[in-house]
Structures are given as C-alpha cells and as structure tokens.
Image: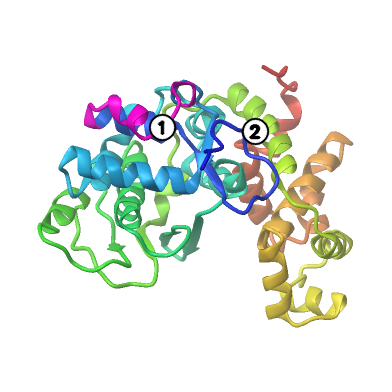
Amino acid sequence: MARDFGQKPAARRTTPRVYASDIRRMLDFIERPELAAALGIPREILDDPDATVPIDVWYGFVEAATEASGDPFLGLHYGIASHRRFRENAGAMRLLLLSSDTMRVAVDRVLRYQRYWNEGESYEIEEQRDLLVVRYRPWGPARPAHVQLAEKTVAQTLAFVRVVARGLVPHAACFPHGRRPGDEELSSVLGCQPQFGRDWTEVVLPANVLDARLPTADAVLFRVLDRQLAERIKEVTPESPFADRVCKVIVDYLHRERLSLAAVARIVGCSERTLQRRLTDAGTSFRGLVDEARRSRAVALLECGAAVPELAAVLGYAEETAFYRAFERWMGTTPEIWRSTPPAAPL
C-alpha cells in the first residue's frame, strides 16, 4: 500500500498525522541512519522540519528503532536527552516553544496548537493548586510503540522543565503499561519511583515551574511564529455549526462572571455531557473556546484603545490579576507592553 508522506497537516483524516522531525532525531540518537530507507521513509521527509507522516508510520518506526538499537528503554533515554537536540532541524512549533517568555506560555501553546503538530494523540495539562499535571494518551489500540512513547513523553517533559529547574524531581510518574524487566532504569533516570497500570501516562510537577522564564525567550520571534501558527491551525480545524453556535453564546455572555458550562448548555438546549462530547468531536473544548474568545476580545479591545483596568470585567474575570495572568500566558507579556510594541513583520 502506498504511503502518504510529507504533507503538512490539513483537515481531519481517517488516519491522523504527526510531525516527522523526531524520526531524524531518533535516527541520529541510535546512529542508524539506514533504518529510514529500510522502512521506506523518503529522505526529503527527514530534511523538512515541518513535514508530517501518518501516525502509524511513526509508531512502526519507533518499534523498528527499539529493536534495531537493542535498547528496551529507547523512549526513556531519547526523551531525557532530547533537550540537547531540541534546536536541531527545528520547525515552527519547536521554535515557538523556545522563544516563549515563560514555561506557562510554552505550555499554553502546546495545548492551543496540538492539532497542528499532532492530530492523533491526546495531551492534557492541568494546574491543581501547587501541582502541575501533564497527561498523555496515544492513538489507537495498544501496541509496543505506546510503551516507548509513554516513557519518552514523561522524560521529554522533564528534560524541558529541567532547563529552568535544574535537578527537578517529579512528584509522580505514572504509566498505563505494566512492570517489565529492568524498569529500575525508569526510577534512576526520572528521579522517582514510577507507578504502573494507570489509566493515563502522567507526570506530576510543582506548579511554580510555570512561572520560570526560558533562557531562549525571544519576544519578536515568538510574536511572528504565534501569528503564523494561529493561521495554520484555522486550516486544520474542521467546520462545526455546533461549535460555532457555542462560540457565539460564549462571546455574547463573556462579560458575565458566572459564564459556565452548565449555563451555555442550557442556552443551546443540551446537557453538559452532550455539549462536551460534541465539542470534543469537533476537535475543541468548552474551556478552549472560552479562552480563545477572551484572548481575541482582549486583543481587539487593546487595539481599539480600551483602558486595561476595564478589560477584566469586560472579559468576565472576577479579579484584574486573573486577567493579567491570562494575558501573559496568551501573549508572553503584559497588556501595556504588548500594545506599545509595534507588530513584527512576517518572516
């Protein structure tokens, strides 16, 4: 069967696609450049940082690389070393993360643009008081690649966070797969005793890492890339009359502090569970729509000269400080600085 290589992400497909850049990095890591050709992966895919492949091609490659390397913990070892290769052959998404002002901004963009860089897998990032919980679920039925990618995700998360919090030890690391021979290697590399047989791949970190400033922050580059990726994500978002209707209700009621999932569900005439399910089917979420509505309204009002202290109430925030935190997460700076900075020219 012919493989569909090298396309950029587009509208939703039966088989989702993911960035192919990790293929080249993993080939370099295991020092087996001939493996790509053996699997029928074209060279031009490896040379294009924004190229994508079907997700089952990526999974098949991970399984072949694990066997070829002889390393049963390839995902773990590759993930923990990934920060040293993060800039190599970097595409727009990786450069955006590197240019983010703080870890909080980078986390926000990982979630906002997930459909662009990875259509099939599921990532969730949640703040719980003083904890930050990062969850991951792979695509499709269980297969050996899922074990490697679960461990890679946890290790890669730690590698990125340790750029600003050297030596950080996670509160917990959980995996859906069971124990296997030699898994004490996980404890040694991650710095904590892993838990197995859980529903999700999950790593729990101290929430204060979100406010750490990245040493590679670049406000001008960030603004250019953020605008470009925002346009690209529109191209891969499927049309949904239901999501559009919910979005209109959110915009109309945005100024009300008590805007909630329950209130919007009543207005559109369905249960909360149905609303969540239908938004998930449309590739979005209630929280994501509210956040995007607030961001778009804030930017529009600032460009029209609105007074910053008034924006919190207009956008439905109970406190001005909550609006400031949200704006810095969206734009990487304060409203005052953002408005006073001339727009960067496109690359």
Give the secondary structure at mark 2: helix
Q: Tell me which numbered mark, 2 or 1, is placed earlier along the sequence.
A: 1
Where residue 92 is drawn, which disc sits there? none
Residue 42 screen position, x and y as percent:
45, 26
Q: Mark 1 points at which residue?
A: 40
Q: Mark 2 points at which residue?
A: 226
Return the residue found at the far front: 1
Give the residue type that dot 1 points to: Gly
Q: In this view, does 304 lie above or below 346?
A: below
Rate crowding at label 1 as few (under 14), some (14 to 19) or many (20 or more) other CA atoms within 10 Å: few
Q: Quadrant of the C terminus?
A: top right
User: Residue 164 versus residue 322: which sits nearer the camera?
Assistant: 164
Which region is colored magenta?
Answer: 30-45
Q: Is residue 148 above or below residue 266?
A: above
User: Residue 317 versus residue 264: which sits nearer the camera?
Assistant: 264
> What's the distance in space between the residues labelled 2 and 1, CA to CA?
34 Å
